[in-house]
Image (cartoon, rainbow, N blue to C red):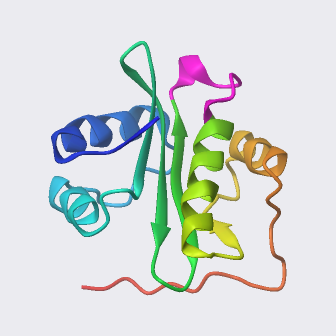
Amino acid sequence: MRNGRLADVDALLSFWIEAAEGTDRHDDPAKVVALIERDPEAVLIAEIDGETAGTLIAGWDGWRAHLYRLAVAPARRRQGVGTVLIRAAEERFAKFGAFRADAMVLHDNVLAHHAWSAAGYAPQPQWSRWVKALS
């Protein structure tokens, strides 16, 4: 387990295309660079034998703990990689005194539902996410 570095940006973008669901978020290197520069511990990378096995963005805004981009290499799924990443994120949040974390999970990504449920997360039916595209 390690944190993402600026040298990882292109590899992260490629990995997310391969391993992440719903990669239509208009990712570009500059945005990932900005994330790493602003919060060098936010990007978690699990490696096995020197290869990326999974990633998770553990964002802390000073108020809330947010989890994004849980992505596990297809060949490494169901081997505990997601569990290790989620635990590392929760340990990071505990250092800040966070009392709750939320995860962005696509409705149709049933495989991810199993991983998040196994880690103790559940949908919160009384809330919905409202978004507005910024131009």
45 lies above or below 43: above
Q: Report the front residue among 88 and 116.
A: 88
Please say whether residue 92 is visible from this viewpoint: yes
Residue 22 location (% of width, % of height): 49, 51
99 on left or right of 76: right
Is 78 above or below relative to 24? above
Q: Is residue 48 toward the left or the right of residue 114 in the image?
A: left
- Check the image and report above or below for 13 versus 46: below
Q: Quadrant of residue 124?
A: bottom right
Decide whether residue 110 is among the magenta residues: no
Judging depth in this view, the residue of 125 and 80 nearest the camera is: 80
Q: Which residues are magenta?
A: 73-81
38 to 22, vertically: above or below: below
Count of all numbered marks drawn on residues in the image: 0
Query: Who's the residue at 74% across and 50% down the image?
Result: 116
- In the rendered structure, the answer to whether residue 11 lies left or right of residue 105 reads left
Task: Please provide percent x and percent y for residue 119.
Answer: 78, 48
Measured from the top left, where is residue 123 in percent x and y?
Answer: 80, 67
Instruction: Give the residue at x 83% y 55%.
Output: 120
x and y percent of residue 121 in the render? 79, 59
Q: Quadrant of the C terminus?
A: bottom left
Nearer the observer, 112 or 22: 112
Residue ranking furthest to the top: 49
Q: Residue at x 83, y 44 (%)?
A: 118
Q: Quadrant of residue 34?
A: bottom left
Q: Residue at x 28, y 64 (%)?
A: 35
Is residue 21 shown to the viewer in this render? no
